[in-house]
């Protein structure tokens, strides 16, 4: 059977321009005179069986002489003929051929009886049912810019165009199924969609997949495939055709956008410098690089302000973050946190100096400075097959912070211009976060230094108390808060305990706390009773608020300052180890917990008093007698209200944790913290523990004396005898002089009766009690004065001296550094 594919014949040559055709030659009588290997492969006949035989014998319908003669006349009348021919294969099957017949012309011309005709033939795919002609489609589809293929209902390839042939050669496709041609996962995905199209007739559009290229299996590209059904004029589904578009650039653009979005979400999640650097490395691997390292200037890690502009010389860098596609970063030359100095010729140093990204797209293992900088690096690069490196400066707000290094192996290929732009965008976003973290680190360091300076560095209760403390700021990132505590040594071996709470968190609350703590220490040195001290502190707070409120230039700050001051609470207690009495007063603060030596816990009822800064009600003191070994527990509300628990529940848990006699202060405090702070505190929390001691007869000596001049000599003798018994003979002379001056002043200017008391601890305290309310005053006597030099002499002989008032009068006291056989007091704290 023959069908004409075109008319007139002159167009046949153009329509049948097929590159891979089998050829043969016919003489003027239609006999085969030349037969090629391609023709033999196409129809199965070797040359020996077909040469000098009529070509008509190859037709599937032999004997159609009239049709053959018509074709011969058409060929001679024109330039040739082209069409579709059904030929008989040597094995008996019918092969549909696309045929083009043209006249062979030599330079001398040929007589009609010596003409030779060239026949080009290519197997034509004609799906069951007919209606699809390769000759009509080939010129339009073979060179289309997208890949196209046709498969039969058995999902075997019957035709592909040039684009797909370049991906996988033709001989590996035609006649084969998708599973024989494509990779396993890709074949399964194609088969699933093709069966869906054959079964439903509905197309499947824009299925995206990635596949390695045939030329370089290590390089991956992205494609989009759409599948359509082939139907004959009767609507029967006779095959599948699909087209494939290379969407690698679109895919890369989408991946870049996704990477930037991921970076925006992941980089800068914390205000930690090294954490931010590690996030940059994590984001870059594996999408952009096989290995990424972030090196920051050592000064940046410390939170210092770098010098603006480029960085020259041999800067000291510290590895802040790194990530690899290999677990554990085995190719890393540095560990995170390790410092290194880069040579001026190194790639990183040049990047920091120029402020521009540097790329070595293809590493030269023999000449590249990055490879030859150290033998260890060269060995690592060769071991892991690194091929390309890029270094980008980390800059923000005109300041160079460090550099990021990205390395690729064959997996991703060399860095190109788009990769450089992507890396620079990632680094620029990370640089702002790193600089923010650096600024935060600087401010946090300053805040913590201030907090350390505002809170006591060491707590000591001397001979009176054994103390321990814990502090937990709610503002965990900055580590500062408004709660405070203190232990203040007073005269006469007494010790003051104080705990306070300023509403709010952070540096403003800490600054307010510092003011109040300083004021309490100043007032404590005046030896004021607790209620009077709180009254003075309350007046001070009111004055500070009023002073700030009067300044219109800080109007925006007034509200917070006033709220901070009026929201402050305080508890002040004074313990006397001689009498074992503890006097307490509170200004809106929670009462302490008192634990007896047997473990009994009590929360004494103390008059609450208003918070500081209100000035509404007076403060009241309560005096309690404590057994030796009692535990005084002072705390702030953040400790017992942690995790939003009710204050009653918190006090109950506190009591249970404290009721454990025989434990050290550290053990007891650990139990309290574990029981109450089950998570980060919602408010600043402070805990101060103090275990009481008592001074016995071996450390305290007291004598009641009449207010008579003759008693001065007796007082000196009593003091000298007692110091001798205590082994403090070297202090006898000065102490006699001090006692003489103090007793003489009391007799002259005060009223009796008098009491002389000596207390031995880490200092020797000498006290004289009288019944007068007037305070002595140190003055400089004139050269003509007969008296007035007593207190001046006392001041020169003692470490310090002072006056404190009692309900019945006053006490003048002095302190001398105790010196004895051991150089300390038997009752001093270990």
Image (tube, rainbow, N blue to C red):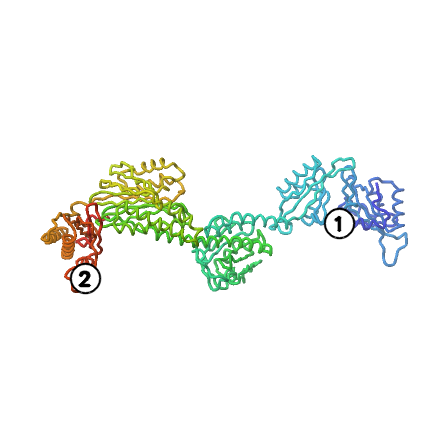
Q: Is residue 370 above or below residue 572?
A: below
Q: Is residue 749 above or below residue 234?
A: below
- The spot of residue 29 in percent (x, y) is 88, 48
Mark 1 Cα shell of 10 Å, populated few (<14), some (14-19), many (≥20): few
Q: Residue 20 got which mark?
A: 1
- The spot of residue 711 in percent (x, y) is 10, 52
546 and 29: which one is in front?
A: 546
Q: Badge 2 is on which residue?
A: 781
759 left or right of 123 in image: left
User: At numbered mark 2, what does the secondary structure look like: helix, strand or loop?
Assistant: loop
Q: Quadrant of residue 233?
A: top right
157 left or right of 648 in image: right
218 left or right of 27 in image: left
Indicate the quadrant containing the N terminus: top left, top right, bottom left or bottom right. top right
Write the residue at 76% across / 50% down: 19
- The spot of residue 634 in percent (x, y) is 31, 43
User: At numbered mark 1, what does the secondary structure look like: helix, strand or loop?
Assistant: loop
CB of mark 2 within 8 Å of CB of mark 1? no
- Of badges 2 and 1, nearer the viewer stands 2
Mark 2 Cα shell of 10 Å, populated few (<14), some (14-19), many (≥20): few
575 and 309: which one is in front?
A: 575
613 left or right of 704 in image: right
């Amino acid at each position: 059977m023959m069908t004409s594919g075109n008319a007139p014949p002159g167009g046949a040559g153009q329509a049948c321009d097929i590159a891979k055709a089998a050829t043969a030659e016919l003489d003027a009588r239609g006999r085969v005179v030349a037969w090629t290997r391609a023709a033999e492969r196409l129809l199965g006949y070797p040359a020996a069986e077909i040469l000098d035989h009529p070509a008509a014998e190859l037709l599937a319908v032999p004997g159609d002489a009239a049709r053959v003669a018509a074709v011969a006349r058409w060929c001679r009348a024109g330039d040739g003929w082209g069409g579709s021919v059904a030929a008989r294969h040597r094995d008996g099957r019918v092969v549909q051929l696309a045929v083009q017949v043209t006249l062979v012309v030599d330079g001398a011309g040929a007589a009609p009886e010596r003409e030779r005709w060239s026949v080009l033939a290519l197997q034509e795919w004609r799906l069951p049912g007919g209606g699809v002609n390769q000759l009509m489609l080939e010129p339009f589809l073979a060179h289309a810019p997208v890949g196209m293929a046709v498969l039969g209902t058995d999902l075997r390839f019957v035709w592909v165009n040039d684009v797909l042939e370049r991906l996988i050669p033709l001989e590996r496709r035609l006649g084969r199924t998708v599973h024989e041609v494509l990779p396993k996962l890709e074949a399964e995905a194609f088969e699933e969609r093709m069966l869906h199209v054959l079964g439903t007739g509905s197309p499947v559009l824009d299925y995206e997949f990635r596949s390695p290229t045939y030329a370089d299996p290590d390089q991956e590209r992205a494609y989009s495939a759409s599948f359509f059904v082939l139907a004959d004029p009767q609507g029967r589904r006779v095959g599948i055709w699909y087209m494939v578009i290379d969407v690698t650039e679109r895919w890369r653009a989408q991946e870049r956008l996704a990477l930037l979005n991921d970076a925006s979400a992941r980089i800068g999640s914390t205000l930690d410098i090294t954490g931010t650097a590690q996030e940059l490395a994590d984001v870059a691997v594996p999408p952009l690089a096989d290995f990424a390292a972030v090196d920051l200037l050592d000064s940046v890690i410390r939170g210092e302000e770098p010098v603006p502009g480029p960085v020259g010389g041999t800067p000291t860098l510290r590895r802040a973050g790194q990530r690899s596609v290999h677990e554990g970063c085995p190719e890393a030359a540095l560990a995170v946190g390790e410092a290194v100095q880069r040579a001026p010729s190194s790639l990183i140093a040049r990047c920091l100096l120029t402020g521009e990204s540097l790329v070595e797209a293809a590493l030269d293992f023999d000449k590249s400075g990055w490879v030859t900088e150290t033998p260890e690096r060269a060995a690592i690069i060769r071991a892991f097959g690194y091929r390309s490196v890029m270094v980008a400066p980390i800059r923000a707000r005109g300041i160079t912070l460090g550099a990021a290094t990205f390395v690729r192996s064959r997996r991703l290929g060399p860095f190109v211009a788009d990769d450089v732009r992507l890396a620079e965008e990632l680094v620029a976003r990370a640089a702002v976060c790193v600089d923010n973290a650096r600024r935060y680190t600087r401010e946090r360091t300053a805040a913590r230094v201030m907090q350390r300076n505002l809170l006591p560095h060491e707590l000591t209760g001397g001979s009176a108390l054994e103390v321990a403390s814990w502090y937990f700021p709610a503002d965990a990132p900055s580590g500062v808060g408004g709660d405070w505590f203190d232990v203040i040594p007073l005269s006469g071996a007494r010790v003051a305990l104080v705990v306070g709470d300023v509403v709010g968190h952070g540096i403003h609350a800490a600054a307010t706390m510092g003011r109040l703590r300083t004021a309490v220490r100043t007032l404590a040195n005046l030896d004021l009773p607790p209620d009077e001290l709180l009254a003075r502190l309350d007046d001070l707070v009111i004055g500070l608020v009023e002073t700030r409120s009067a300044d219109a230039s800080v109007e925006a700050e007034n509200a917070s300052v006033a709220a901070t001051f009026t929201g402050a609470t305080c508890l002040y207690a004074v313990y006397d180890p001689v009498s074992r009495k503890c006097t307490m007063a509170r200004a809106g603060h929670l009462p302490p917990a008192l634990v007896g030596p047997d473990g009994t816990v009590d929360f004494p009822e103390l008059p609450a008093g208003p918070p500081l800064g209100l000035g509404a009600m007076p403060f009241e003191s309560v005096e309690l007698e404590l057994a030796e070994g009692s535990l005084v527990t002072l705390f702030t509300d953040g400790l017992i209200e942690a995790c939003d628990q009710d204050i009653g529940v918190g006090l109950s848990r506190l009591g249970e944790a404290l009721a454990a006699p025989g434990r050290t202060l550290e053990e007891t405090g650990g139990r309290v913290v574990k029981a109450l702070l089950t998570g980060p505190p919602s408010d600043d929390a402070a805990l101060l523990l103090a275990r009481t001691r008592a001074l016995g007869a071996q450390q305290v000596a007291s004598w009641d004396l009449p207010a008579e001049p003759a008693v001065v000599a007796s007082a000196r003798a009593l003091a000298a005898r007692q110091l001798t018994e205590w082994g403090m003979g070297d202090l006898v002379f000065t102490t006699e002089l001090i006692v003489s001056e103090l007793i003489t002043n009391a007799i002259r200017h005060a009223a009796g009766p008098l009491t002389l008391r000596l207390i031995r601890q880490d200092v020797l305290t000498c006290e004289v009690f009288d019944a007068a309310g007037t305070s002595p005053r140190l003055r400089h006597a004139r050269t003509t004065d007969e008296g007035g030099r007593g207190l001046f002499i006392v001041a020169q002989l003692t470490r310090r001296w002072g006056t404190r008032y009692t309900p019945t009068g006053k006490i003048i006291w002095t302190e001398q550094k105790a010196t004895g056989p051991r150089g300390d007091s038997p009752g001093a704290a270990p």
